[in-house]
Amino acid sequence: MEIPFAENYKIKMVEPIYRSTREQRVRWIAEANYNLFNLRSEQVFIDLLTDSGTGAMSDRQWAAIMTGDESYAGSSSYYHLKETIRSIFGFEYFLPTHQGRAAENVLFSALVKEGDLVPGNSHFDTTKGHIEYRKAKAIDCTVDEAFDTESKFPFKGNVDLAKLEEVLKLQPEKNIPAIIITITCNTSGGQPVSMDNMKAVKQLADKYGVPVIYDSARFAENAWFIQQKEEGFAGKTIREIVSEMFSYADAMTMSSKKDGAVNIGGFIAMKDVSWYEKASTFNIMYEGFVTYGGMAGRDMNALAVGLNEVTTNDFLDTRIKQVHYLGDQLIEYGIPVQHPIGGHAVFVDAKKFFPHVPKEEFVAQTLAIILYLEAGVRGVEVGTLLADRDPETRDNRYPKLEFLRLAIPRRTYTNNHMDVVAAGLKNIYDIRDEIRTGLRIRKEAPIMRHFTVQLDKV
Ligand code: F0G
């Protein structure tokens, strides 16, 4: 018999979670205005809201916490992290920030101005928010395969080079400060970008003199997919692949809460000293002095260890196999999901799941609420609520895909938890034809409304 796969860690510390009743959840979700962000964590049994900052650190990371250096300037923890970033990504210059969106805020303050165009592959919502806030425009150049959830194309995060070139032809030197490639592409389903595509984007960018920035939150998962699926990379280590990936970038923004395997933190890293100098001013204004940028020394230490742990097959095999364990069960039940299963989450295609719920009634949010009621599982809508309104017309933007995202925290839940999630969704799928109405908005914020929106049942 073949020896099966198993996690390459054992558990040293546990945190109790509470399994509530349906009656409790009916009350709690109404009190939360049908917004899952308003629930208290004790009201959630299995929390798949996000894989961001919700993972478990290793004993080595906790040990590094104890040796953190809390000096305001020039701490040894800063230099430990700087050296780790240089050795993994090859960037000489780096600025710590308190999380990923802070890195975007600092770097875009230095680069992006009113009227600019910033092409990329389905920018994440905070990235787009920071671009639009500066009255610039994020232009999505993702390949069309990404919008066909049934296509098995392995690199749905790829940039469509023809779409990109159309944008680059529009006076790059004046109003295209950078191309942003998100690895993996969260919005399209945690889908990876191929090495071939990164290389081609860089060549095109060089032709037009436009720099390339990677939004790198899940860069290690992206490298794993290249190793597993792209020709010529099977024999390479994750570190070798990461090193080549970043050789095609001029800078990176990072949310360390994902593939940094820590609970808080972020950074910017770059090749060019002039970018570093410009961004440093904004870092000091918004985040903190350049050698801590909103992070405690101990947290920089834990991040340095985390980056080394995550860039190994030891870590990534276990991580991504769990995501696929859940995804494969849903596929077996016939539940429509984004294929192939991505790196950090399973994305359920809500429009196909609930064909009778009108798009104006927030189909994926409706599914997220019903899953919470059924099994105490909290997922998140990646659909019309998240897409916000058009900044000019104020009309709802209806994205091509309407997803319920089930994001799996790193090293946190067991496969038994995944079985609960799958059974909950199956029960709902069995009665899907009875669900014909969704939700309507009572109150919303002008930007990033999904965090605070108040909803009513239709
Ligand atoms: N870029 C990507 C691709 C992200 O997924 C996120 C965060 C950010 C940037 C911003 O980083 O949260 O540290 O400020 N994504 C989280 C999520 C919130 O749930 O996917 P942050």
Image (cartoon, rainbow, N blue to C red):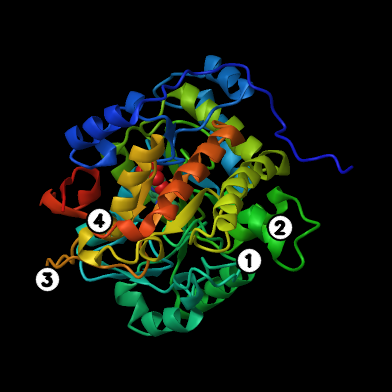
Can you say which quadrant of the picture contains the N terminus? top right
- What whole-number distance in Å separates the C-alpha atoms at marks 4 and 3? 16 Å
Q: Are marks 1 and 2 in contact (CB under 8 Å)?
A: no
Query: Label 3 amino acid?
Result: Thr
Asked whether residue 9 appears in the rendered view, the answer is yes
Q: Are marks 2 and 3 in contact (CB under 8 Å)?
A: no
Q: What residue would you read off at disc 3?
A: 393
- What whole-number distance in Å separates the C-alpha atoms at marks 1 and 4? 32 Å
- What whole-number distance in Å separates the C-alpha atoms at marks 1 and 2? 10 Å
Image height of 224 relative to 309, above or below: below
Residue 100 image position (x, y, % from top left): 39, 44
For image coordinates 60% across by 36% down, the residue present is: 415
SS category of the residue bearing label 1: helix
- What whole-number distance in Å separates the C-alpha atoms at marks 4 and 2? 35 Å
- What crowding class fits label 2: few (fewer than 14 Cα within 10 Å), some (14-19), or many (20 or more)? many
Q: Looking at the image, is mark 1 or mark 4 earlier in the sequence?
A: 1
Residue 457 image position (x, y, % from top left): 17, 49
For image coordinates 55% across by 39% down, the residue present is: 418
Query: Label 1 amino acid?
Result: Met
Q: What residue would you read off at disc 4?
A: 385
Q: Looking at the image, is mark 2 or mark 3 earlier in the sequence?
A: 2
Camera-side residue: 207 or 158?
A: 158
Q: What residue would you read off at disc 2?
A: 227
Image height of 27 relative to 48, above or below: above
Mark closer to the observer (4, 3): 4
For image coordinates 18% across by 63% down, the residue present is: 389
Camera-side residue: 61 or 376?
A: 376
Q: Quadrant of residue 199?
A: bottom right
